[in-house]
């Protein structure tokens, strides 16, 4: 029984969301290659007319969209654009049989509408509709049979792309979670140095903030795909995003304040006022990062969120200190508030992003 259990655990680790995330470029390439070969096989075995458009569609839908939510979103938009473009193409073929000039005017009007809408919210749908119009109708001289086969191939390509996107999928929500976890972990490490007034050199600090901001931007780009995968709304994701940005801003201010060596003695004496806040903030950041990366919701709830009243006065003795020392205390208190808000937001939305691991 033990060997079976051991093999199960090994396979479970290999197929875990975090393992898939670590190897997703190779897995994505494998999915695209398998999907492409399936479209080629269908075209060759069943001698599908204009079957190459099936392969083209699959590459367009899957190629640059490794996340399941992005593929769903693009495939849905492509389906709408394909139907619209195919209908416009059939109309163009019909008009060509009556008057080539009317056909060209119709296609020109459709191209103008596609270009106008392509710069708005319906951009991808409009672009696909314009491309499909040309694929289906040519210059109006294609047959109805050719038009219908090409439209069908485009739809089949989109469906096959969706099918292979579900093969060991890289979910946008997992990518978003891991980026947030990495940021919290790096913030905890930097804050640990700030708390004891032992700052790294300026180049190291700048590299850390560059990494943090790069991940923050990447999270912003995933929000739409995450909202398409789970029941998290863009507004809820944006709230976490803003709080995270505030946290980074406070850390940057704290680093600047602590760079003045002449104030370190005063800061060290003031540290007793906020030592508990510093320990709690670091523990919250590390525990939340672990909970996100390894789906350990129990770790997130264990440390918990203890709502505290908004700070309206500094701790006793802080008001007698210098301006920079007071700022140091205030920044520590505010940073803890931001970390607690991220923790609270994740607990409130856990039903959307949390997936309990499979147990042997």
Image (cartoon, rainbow, N blue to C red):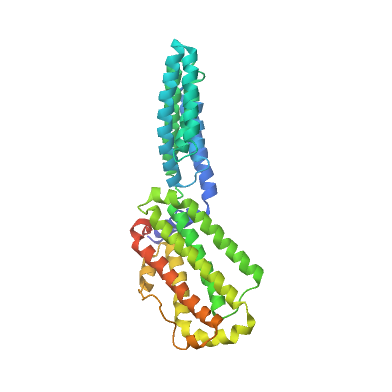
Residue occupying the point 58% across, 76% down: 257
Residue 206 makes an appearance in the image: yes
Occupied quadrant, residue 125? top left
The vertical placement of 186 against 35, above or below, is below
Q: Where residue 18 sits: x, y (%)? A: 47, 57
Look at 46% across and 60% down and name the residue there.
241
What is the quadrant of the C terminus in the image?
A: bottom left
For the residue pair 312 and 338, the one nearer the viewer reads as: 312
Residue 50 visible from this viewpoint = no
Residue 157 location (% of width, % of height):
45, 32
26 sits left or right of 358 in the view: right
- For image coordinates 59% across by 73% down, the residue present is 256
Pick out the residue farthest to the top. 98
Quadrant of the drawing holding the N terminus: bottom left
* Callout count: 0
In terms of image quadrants, where is residue 190? Answer: bottom right
Q: Is residue 235 above or below residue 208?
A: above
Q: Position of residue 285 (x, y in %)?
A: 46, 70
Whole-percent x, y for residue 120 in the image: 47, 39
Instruction: Give the vertical position of 161 relative to 352 (above or below).
Output: above
Residue positioned 44% across, 38% down in the render? 122
Q: Nearer the viewer, residue 176 or 250?
A: 250
């Amino acid at each position: 029984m033990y060997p079976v259990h051991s093999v199960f655990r090994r396979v479970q680790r290999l197929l875990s969301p975090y393992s898939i995330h670590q190897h997703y470029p190779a897995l994505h390439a494998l999915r695209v290659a398998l999907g492409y070969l399936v479209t080629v096989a269908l075209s060759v075995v069943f001698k599908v007319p204009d079957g190459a458009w099936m392969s083209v569609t699959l590459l367009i839908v899957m190629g640059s969209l490794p996340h399941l939510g992005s593929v769903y979103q693009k495939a849905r938009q492509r389906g709408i654009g394909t139907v619209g473009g195919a209908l416009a193409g059939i109309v163009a073929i019909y008009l060509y049989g009556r008057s080539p000039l009317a056909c060209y005017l119709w296609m020109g009007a459709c191209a103008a509408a596609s270009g106008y809408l392509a710069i708005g919210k319906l951009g991808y749908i409009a672009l696909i509709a314009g491309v499909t119009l040309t694929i289906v109708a040519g210059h109006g001289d294609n047959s109805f049979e050719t038009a219908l086969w090409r439209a069908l191939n485009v739809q089949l390509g989109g469906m096959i792309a969706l099918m292979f996107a579900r093969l060991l999928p890289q979910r946008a929500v997992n990518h978003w979670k891991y980026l947030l976890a990495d940021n919290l972990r790096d913030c905890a490490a930097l804050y640990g140095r700030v708390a004891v007034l032992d700052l790294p050199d300026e180049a190291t600090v700048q590299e850390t903030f560059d990494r943090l901001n790069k991940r923050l931007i990447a999270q912003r780009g995933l929000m739409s795909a995450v909202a398409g995968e789970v029941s998290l709304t863009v507004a809820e994701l944006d709230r976490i995003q803003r709080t995270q940005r505030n946290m980074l801003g406070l850390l940057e201010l704290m680093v600047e304040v602590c760079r003045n060596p002449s104030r370190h003695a005063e800061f060290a004496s003031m540290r007793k006022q906020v030592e508990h806040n510093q320990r709690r903030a670091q523990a919250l950041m590390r525990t939340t990062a672990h909970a996100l990366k390894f789906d350990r919701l129990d770790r997130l709830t264990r440390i918990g969120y203890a709502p505290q009243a908004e700070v309206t006065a500094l701790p006793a003795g802080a008001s007698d200190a210098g301006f920079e020392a007071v700022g140091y205390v205030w920044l520590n208190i505010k940073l803890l508030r931001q970390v607690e808000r991220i923790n609270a937001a994740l607990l409130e939305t856990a039903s959307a992003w949390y997936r309990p691991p499979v147990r042997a």
